[in-house]
């Protein structure tokens, strides 16, 4: 960044108008020329502008500053959160005096918040403060800025935008040198984002590359998560044997490090494999083990397992057990903003268990509340599951026009899933 860009950057960060900054120092048109790089101010004017902005306009050793922040990022990558917190406090306890310091501080503070607590709100504010210089950030700073933007979108569930920014981050690899672990993390996040979008080929390619790097560097926990992604991809194409193989390899790592969080994810996906194979009793056992392993995790980490368990109880006609499970969790689901979307699913199964059939009341709830919510969110998997239930109800009641409409909607939902490359649903 040139001198004018630095002055404009800090003026905007400190929320000053050109009039407020220029007052008593120079004219507004002259300040505008400085900020646009048209003219170089005298040493005296530079001094006065820097004093008013409370900054240092002298050049700094950007490479040395970046190294300190990358050291923090490495601790986050290794999930050494205690060390990361100490480094974070040391780097942020004093205010930034240069533009480069301030930009890096905001970028890595946002990365720290997202990788430790998925704190997207504050990260969004921090990255917005540097967004106006998006087009002038160069070199290594551009890599970390784009990475932070990608993470922000990922943790905000904006997976399309996340993948876009991760690919932009990848483009920076051609112009700068980065450590192998940084490249591995980026490839992993691309695979993870593509997996969320059911872009199976991209997810497989990038996850496999990341796995190779993690294995080379003996980062076994990351290896396990890569194998879980690969297992999900194989499940979608009905390759149950390979899916199970990948999950069992991941389980070996979870057992080695006694990692219950990892076990919970593995058991959940093993349960989904069993469910798709029609082995409901085995699925219930595995999903129950998953829920137990996730005991200390937040509700958002458990909700998919809870819903999967409820489905299996419905399949094997264990209505009482299913109702008990729903009653245990539904109040928490209703009060948790991250899980509120699942409330309607649980209410549907609660009614189904209570009436033991798809009667008029259950079907009306599906049509008036459940289905519109799913259509709004383009939840094609759930729609492809619920549409035929409604169609069958109308068919059994000799309402063939309505039945035909819902069967047609089923075909449309399945077509959407096919376009996305989905055979079965499964998530981390």
Image (cartoon, rainbow, N blue to C red):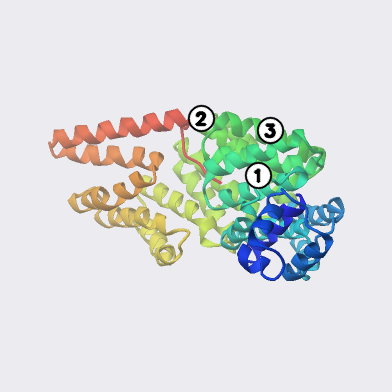
Q: Circle 3 sits in a helix, a strand or a loop, which is it?
A: helix
Q: Circle 2 sits in a helix, a strand or a loop, which is it?
A: loop
Image side of residue 215 versus residue 297, left or right: right
Front residue (pair 112, 300): 112
Residue mark closest to the camera, 2 vs 3: 3
Q: Which mark is residue 238?
A: 2
Q: Position of residue 146 (x, y in %)?
A: 66, 46
Vertical placement of residue 243 versus 22, above or below: above
Q: Which residue is mark 3?
A: 208
Q: Residue at x 54, y 33 (%)?
A: 199
N-terminal label among 1 and 2: 1
Q: Which mark is residue 309?
A: none
Q: Is residue 160 visible?
A: yes
Front residue (pair 396, 73): 73
Q: How crowded is the residue under tag 2: few (<14 C-alpha within 10 Å), some, or many (20+)?
A: some
Q: Position of residue 75 (x, y in %)?
A: 78, 56
Q: Residue at x 51, y 29 (%)?
A: 237
Q: Residue at x 37, y 45 (%)?
A: 315
Q: Position of residue 310 (x, y in %)?
A: 41, 52
Q: Which mark is residue 135?
A: 1
């Amino acid at each position: 960044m040139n001198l004018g860009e630095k002055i404009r950057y800090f003026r905007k960060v400190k929320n000053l108008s050109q009039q407020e900054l220029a007052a008593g120092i120079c004219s507004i048109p002259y300040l505008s020329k400085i900020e646009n790089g048209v003219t170089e101010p005298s040493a005296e004017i530079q001094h006065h502008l820097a004093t008013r902005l409370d900054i240092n306009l002298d050049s700094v050793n950007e490479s040395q500053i970046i190294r300190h922040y990358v050291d923090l990022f490495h601790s986050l990558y290794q999930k050494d959160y205690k060390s990361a917190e100490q480094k974070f406090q040391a780097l942020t306890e004093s205010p930034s005096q240069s533009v480069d310091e301030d930009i890096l501080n905001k970028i890595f503070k946002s990365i720290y918040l997202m990788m430790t607590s998925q704190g997207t709100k504050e990260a969004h504010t921090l990255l917005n403060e540097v967004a106006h210089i998006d087009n002038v950030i160069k070199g290594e700073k551009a890599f970390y800025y784009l990475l932070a933007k990608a993470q922000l979108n990922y943790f905000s569930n904006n997976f399309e935008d996340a993948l876009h920014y991760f690919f932009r981050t990848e483009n920076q690899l051609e112009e700068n040198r980065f450590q192998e672990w940084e490249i591995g993390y980026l490839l992993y996040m691309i695979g993870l984002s593509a997996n969320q979008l059911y872009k199976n080929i991209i997810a497989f390619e990038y996850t496999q590359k990341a796995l190779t790097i993690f294995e080379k560097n003996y980062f076994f926990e990351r290896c396990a998560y890569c194998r879980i992604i690969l297992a999900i991809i194989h499940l979608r194409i009905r390759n149950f044997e390979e899916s199970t193989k990948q999950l069992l390899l991941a389980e070996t790592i979870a057992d080695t490090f006694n990692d219950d969080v990892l076990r919970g994810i593995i058991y959940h996906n093993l349960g989904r494999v069993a469910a798709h194979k029609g082995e409901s009793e085995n699925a219930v056992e595995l999903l129950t083990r998953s829920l137990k392993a996730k005991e200390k995790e937040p509700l958002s980490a458990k909700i998919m397992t809870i819903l999967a368990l409820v489905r299996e109880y419905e399949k094997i006609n264990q209505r009482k057990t299913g109702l008990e499970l729903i009653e245990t969790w539904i109040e928490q689901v209703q009060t948790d903003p991250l899980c509120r979307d699942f409330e309607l699913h649980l209410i549907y199964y609660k009614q189904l268990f209570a009436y033991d059939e798809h009667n008029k009341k259950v079907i009306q709830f599906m049509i008036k509340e459940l289905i519109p919510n799913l259509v709004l969110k383009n939840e094609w998997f759930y729609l492809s599951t619920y549409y035929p239930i409604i169609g069958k109800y109308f068919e059994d009641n000799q309402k063939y026009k309505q039945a035909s409409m819902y069967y047609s909607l089923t075909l449309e939902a399945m077509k959407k899933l096919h376009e996305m490359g989905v055979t079965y649903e499964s998530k981390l």
